Amino acid sequence: MNDMTRPDMAKAARAILARNDRGGYTVPTERLYPFQWNWDSAFVAMGFATFDVDRAYRELERLAEGQWDDGMIPHIVFHAPSDTYFPGPDVWGTRHRIPTSGITQPPVFGMALRHVHEAAVAAGDAGAAERTRKLFRNALRSHRWWLAARDPEGTGLVAILHPWESGSDNSPAWDEALARVPTTTTTAIRRKDTGHVDPSMRPRDVDYQRFIHLVDVYRDCGWDPAKQWKAAPFKVAEVQMTAILARSTRDLIDLARRLDLPDETTELTSMAETLEKGLAGRWRDDLSRFVSRDLVSGEDIAAPTQAGFIPLIAVMLDQSQRKAVDAEIAHWCEGMAVGVPSTMPSAPAFEPRRYWRGPVWAVINWLIADGLRHNGLNDTARRVERGTVQAMERAGFCEYFDPTTGEGLGGDTFSWTAAAYLVLNRRS
Ligand code: DGY
């Protein structure tokens, strides 16, 4: 890869999106992830928007086909069968007209919709307003679901009930909360992921036992949000999720104004204010980052993971917070071949090759850079973006990168990494 020019790389990134296209939706990578994943597709839509706005809209439209009547957009839409992934639709046992999983994922959808809309308007696409208006409705229903189902007490922080919802499945952030979840399952566990990727780069078997225990509990609740909320053995008011929801809410407000929807603008503005207030209260001076709260133990989750920096996309820091966060990110990146690691390298939990316990993820860097820019930390944002683009130029469009060596790890020809290249390469 390293002798490819930037235009060659962009061409290769577009070829990956084409190769992973399954008919209007994009699989994250073949075999390891053979269906449509929620937040993957939102990032992918932004990648498509750099060269094909029609296809970008299509990605979101196909994801919206999986939306439940209560508004939830599931984390996987099983559009077509595949036997290379576990757990498949039979394990989830949901009742949507297209088979889906029963949990959700970070709502990047709203951010993506604004991005796609702006690209479509810039390209002079006459159908943009109509397509955006329909998808805006899907997004609004999903945001209402988030607030009602995952913050029923109105704290301004939304909770995850499963580590898979965070998208950061085996992050050290969940170690304590997940340790309380029993390892017993009624579902037989038949992992497929470790047949596609070296097991040392994936969650451990004991993590999977707990992941599937949670699926069993929620399936027994008939996927009813109120019953799940009561029964949940794992419940974390999460700052990365809340920040993405808050940022997406601001992006929907922008769209609501352009589409001349005053009632929706008012509703979304009150939602955004609630979430931003909730997030602002999660800053910890002693850690120079934001922390989630374990709602089962009532304790803060101080584990140093990337999630602590994501609120920058939604919150305006004061001058001293800004300085502190800038120094903290620099500290995490010291001596690394590529930053920003998903776990602080000096932490005992840091494992540079294991999935969410240390590796660098291009889409996380994209969010961190957006947050840094939002807070006027433009030089650091540029450094993060440039480092991410260079990592891809050296190692290709892998799922993630070892921060200590820059080596590409996990699945290869990864759709969201290709999408990140198409967007970040224009900035750096
Ligand atoms: C997996 O199967 O590894 C996913 O991250 C769950 O969505």
Image: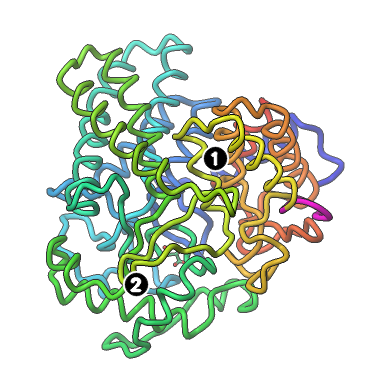
Q: Which residues are magenta?
A: 332-338
Q: Residues within 10 Å of mark 1 (few under 14, many from 20)?
A: some
Residue at (49% x, 33% y) in the render: 46
Q: What amino acid is at disc 1?
A: Leu
- Residue 208 in the figure: left or right of residue 249: right
Q: What amino acid is at disc 2?
A: Ser
Secondary structure found at label 2: loop
Give the residue number, with chain letter if any, for mark 2.
297
Quarter containing the C terminus = top right
* Residue 367: mark: 1
Residue at (55% x, 77% y) in the render: 194
Way the structure is coloured: rainbow
- Residue 173 in the figure: left or right of residue 111: right
Query: Which picture quadrant has residue 345?
Result: bottom right
Q: Position of residue 190 (x, y in %)?
A: 41, 84
Residue at (77% x, 41% y) in the render: 390
